[in-house]
Image (tube, coloured by chain):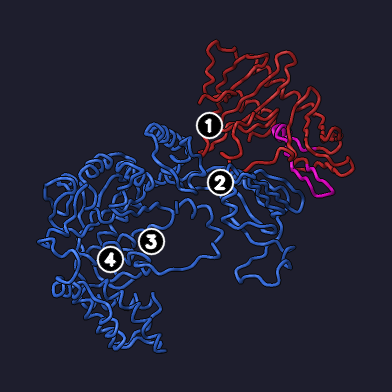
Chain colours: A blue, B red
Amino acid sequence: MASIAAAKVAEVRETTRVERVGAHSHIRGLGLDDSLEPRVVSQGMVGQLTARRAAGVVLEMIKEGKIAGRAILLAGQPGTGKTAIAMGMAQALGADTPFTSMAGSEIYSLEMSKTEALTQAIRKSIGVRIKEETEIIEGEVVEVQVDRPATGVGTKVGKLTLKTTEMETIYDLGGKMIECIMKEKVQAGDVITIDKATGKISKLGRSFTRARDYDATGPQTRFVQCPEGELQKRKEVVHTVSLHEVDVINSRTHGFLALFSGDTGEIKSEVREQINAKVAEWREEGKAEIVPGVLFIDEVHMLDIECFSFLNRALENEMAPVVIMATNRGITRIRGTNYVSPHGIPIDLLDRMNIVATKPYEEKELKEILKIRCEEEDCEMAEDALTVLTRIAGETSLRYAIQLITTAGLVSRKRKSNEVQMEDIKRVYSLFLDENRSMQFLKEYQDEFMFNDMGDSNDAMEVTDG
Amino acid sequence: MAKGDCDWVSYLSSAQRSALVENGVRKIHYKLPDGKEMVEEYNISTDVIQRRMWKAFDPFRGEKWNVELGDPLAQLDNVDSIGIKENSTAPTLTKRITKKSIEWRIRNLPYPRDVYSVEADDEGITVRTSNKKYFKKINVPELERAGLKTDNSLLSFTHQFNTLIITYKKPTKVTEMETKILEMAKLVSPTKVPDLKDAPSECRPS
């Protein structure tokens, strides 16, 4: 979904986007130089040199695009940067290569079978670059009119009047298009373009003639000239869509607008076969190009034996993407069986994988990561506070230390200081328990908690299989 | 697109052709060497071309035919499945060819005659309205194929029954070329079981 949107609205940046800081938003790439040698600190990545180097080699393999159906396993303890490496690969690949990220447990849904969810994920990771001529409607909105039926139920009817300097036309709108228009908050005076093939609407700005409509406008409001000439223009464009999107568009029951609403459901295998044949045909005719991408499955031990055997088979397909999996489990039970296997993955699948190990960070690296996170979260930290935090990260976990950054930042702001001092760290350290202290606490006081008479506490935490 | 007399004729003659006669219409399907596909429909009794359309590549809705000439294909999609389309009161342009001239009809134009201005320049014909309600640039592939430019003196237009009719007299070169192509088309014998699986069908099997 992200790739299709990015391909089409590259020119128009969203003006109301709010930046949120995520767990891995400081990562901008793998931090390798041209000869694939990892730099110690670069692009938000720290340490983990061999794993990053290996990821770089995999990246080259993906970029060449020749080899399909390889699997890479990132294995390592919790908090050793497995997801970070995958995110770095996604960033390094750029927006044009499809990168699908999913968690192992995402496949368990009531609406879809497990294999369907996996198939969709696989097909989302294969891009088709299509060159085609589309009709673009570009004009200034004169009027938007949406009529709801008097009874309140049933389809809405909409009309959109657009004009250029030379002409004016009324368009009828379908239900999904009305939703798009509402979502984009299109109103009279906006200059918009509509891609007729995909129904994608993008706002170019407001018309100059409407500049005096309001006394105040937002800082992002752009004023543009009313377009000239004809409303509809033919334009050659290159779309990168994923195979899954082509599937959805062609599954008759939904139509292409289901892409924007997201209700896709299961797709028949006949449809997929037809699409595969069609895409192969386009490829031969030079109309389309296949861009194999990457499917990243985090927490892969959550997949069960059926999924693993399905993956085994799916990887053999020549259209398969490169699958990167990450797990933090050691030798454990394969979900859905009573067999024990390394990483909870069957040996036959493990055999097909290139395994990349991540190692725990050293103290110096921990400090670098914490420094990067401080910058990312706009939090200034005193040198001694950072040292203490690094110690905490070493003794408890990196994630816990990163969480303390935010909270300590808030505490320091409350006492009107712009810099986080040691005392702030101490304060939040006492306020928030890490996993070890929490366990300690539970061991001491478990008699006073509810339902503590369950017997041996070791088995209670074990994952049960469905 | 091929330029000049010989070019267009030889371009079409290099195609793989098949024909079908149906309801008094001779349909010729051209499979051109550069991968394009084109269909021409001739009226058998008058030998005048009724329709010409090109196959377009549309990854989102399967195959699509762009009508260059003649009445547009019936649109079976409703507005909900395609999202947006012109209102039924919006002006529509159709083009047809008669023995002597090329004609464009723009329906749903209710304004009086003196509103319109129709001019020919090197790129084609431009229709304007002084009330800024309609504007269209029409290119004339027939002239382009013959290597000719549009000539203002051959152009005329009338307006009646909410329709603007633009007429362009065919130069002799265009007429000659059309005759050659028609002769070529007549040589293709209609097949009993036509290989027209690529041709558009009016009835879409579901």
Residue A92 place in picture, x, y as percent: 37, 60
Query: How far apart, in angstroms, are the residues tagged by discs 3 and 1?
Result: 38 Å
Q: Earlier in the sequence, mark 4 or mark 2?
A: 4
Magenta-span inclusion, residue B141 = yes
Q: Is A428 above or below relative to A268?
A: below
Residue A333 drawn at (x, y percent):
14, 51
Number of the front mark, 4 or 2 = 2
Dot 4 falls on which chain? Answer: A
Q: CA distance from mark 3 to mark 2?
A: 32 Å
In the depicted structure, whether residue B198 falls above or below residue A78: above
Same-chain status of marks 1 and 4: no
Q: Which residues are magenta?
A: B126-150
Residue type, mark 1 in image = Gly
Please name the residue that numbered disc 3 is placed on. A91
The residue that mark 4 highlights is: A37
* C-alpha gap between disc 1 and disc 4: 47 Å
Q: Secondary structure at mark 2?
A: helix
* Pointers 3 and 4 in contact (C-beta within 8 Å): no
- Density class for disc 3 (Cα within 10 Å; few <14, some 14-19, many ≥20) is some
Evaluate whether label 3 is on the same chain as label 4.
yes
Q: Nearer the viewer, mark 3 or mark 4?
A: 3
Q: How far apart are the two marked residues, 3 and 4, measured between alpha carbons?
A: 17 Å
Q: For residue A176, which numbered disc appears in the image?
A: 2
Give amino acid for label 3: Gln
Residue type at mark 4 is: Glu
Query: Mark 2 or mark 3, which is nearer the start of the sequence?
Result: 3
- Check disc 2: other Cα within 10 Å, few if <14, some if 14-19, many if 20+: many
Residue B35, label in figure = 1
Mark yes or no: residue A98 visible: yes
